[in-house]
Image (spheres, rainbow, N blue to C red):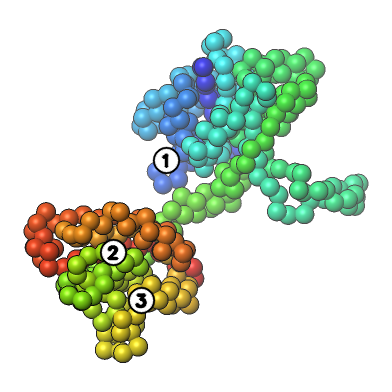
Amino acid sequence: MKTHAIIVAAGLGKRFGSSHKVFIEIKGKPIFIWSIEPFENVEKIDYIWIVTRKEMFEKVKYYLQKFNIKKAKKIIEGGKERQDSVYNALKSLPQDTDIVLIHDAARPFVKKELVQEVLNSLSKSVDGVVPGVCLTDTVKWIKKNNLIGGTLNRGILRAIQTPQAFWYKKLVSAYENAYKEGFYGTDDASLIERVGGKVIAINGSQDNIKITTKEDLDKMEDLVDKPMEVFKFIRIGIGYDSHRFAEGRKLIIGGVEIPYEKGLSGHSDADILTHAIIDALLGSAGLGDIGKHFPDTDPAYRDISSLILLEKTLELLKFNNVEPLWIDCTIFAEKPKMSPYIPEMLKNFKKYGININIKAKTNEQMGFIGRQEGIAAQAVCLSKILKI
């Protein structure tokens, strides 16, 4: 199956006020390269064809080489209108092309995942696939003299984006029909629709914005910086706990009572795994450690189930607008073997809405763990700050 992508970068940028719109650099990279890279990284796409104005050919070649765009097959001269530019590219594609994707270079935040989803949704039962997003504003149609004619049902409306995917021969046929009848559409799908073709819409992305005005550049810069902004709301906490073995005690780890000749010494039930998790949770919220909130000098916590302490800790995080996202932890024990009990431990923690992974390892007969003097556990917690 031969699949080609056409990137349209031949616009005059009338509303933007500059014909060099897609060549403006954001973070050292021109907008049209931002748009091309996701297609470069989709395995199903064989080649990329760039449509631009003739005077920009050398500039495009320079950037393609600089940013190592290996799938770029050919640079094609654009036409008077967008439709003319796309048609020039369609005529240049090899005749054994099966699928063609068309994308506007002015949409630099298209994601690889969206490109793949558009491709995967194109089946023999449809002629084309377009991504679209729901409208959030009320939409009205206007009559003469700005008189409101009525309110449209936004529930059935979509703002359509690119990339759009089509069966190559069907799209070429639709283009030829449009030119025969002097029709110019606002997107490629409209040419398929007018000849009775079947086009389906899939969910697009609100981030897949089109750079139309200079104000849109500010949005683009915000989106470029967006991944770094996320780190303002992310916290990581680390927890560790260890206890000696003791006669006459139950061995409780992860809220599970494990049959063994000894238990662990401690003020509470000495559940080292749950203690490590509590410390990781508190650390991710910047709230100190387990000893600060549940001191071993307080009789109220003698022999208490550590799962109760965990529940109190989660309430404390919620009060402080902290949401734990993921916890990864490891139990270190020479004996007894922990793996048979991990599924039950996972069930215990998931009751509290915790997303968690539990591993178990020996210490290769080294140190206090290797000498079977005690057991240890460590945990790492990733949390999100809901409000700063």
Q: Looking at the picture, how far across and down is residue 378, in whole percent?
A: 25, 64
What is the CA distance from the residue labelled 1 to the residue labelled 2? Answer: 58 Å
Q: Is residue 34 visible?
A: yes
Quick one: label 2, few (<14), some, or many (20+) residues within 10 Å?
some
Sequence-wise, the earlier of marks 1 and 2 is 1
Camera-nearest label, 3 or 2: 2
Q: Which residue is mark 2?
A: 258
Q: Which residue is mark 1?
A: 29
Q: Return the residue nearer the eye: 243 or 282.
A: 243
Three-letter code, disc 1: Lys
* SS class, disc 3: loop
Rendered image quadrant of residue 229: bottom left
Q: Which residue is mark 3?
A: 305
Q: Return the residue nearer the eye: 19 or 268.
A: 268
Residue found 75% across the figure and 44% down from its top: 157
Residue found 60% across the figure and 30% down from its top: 121
Three-letter code, disc 3: Ser
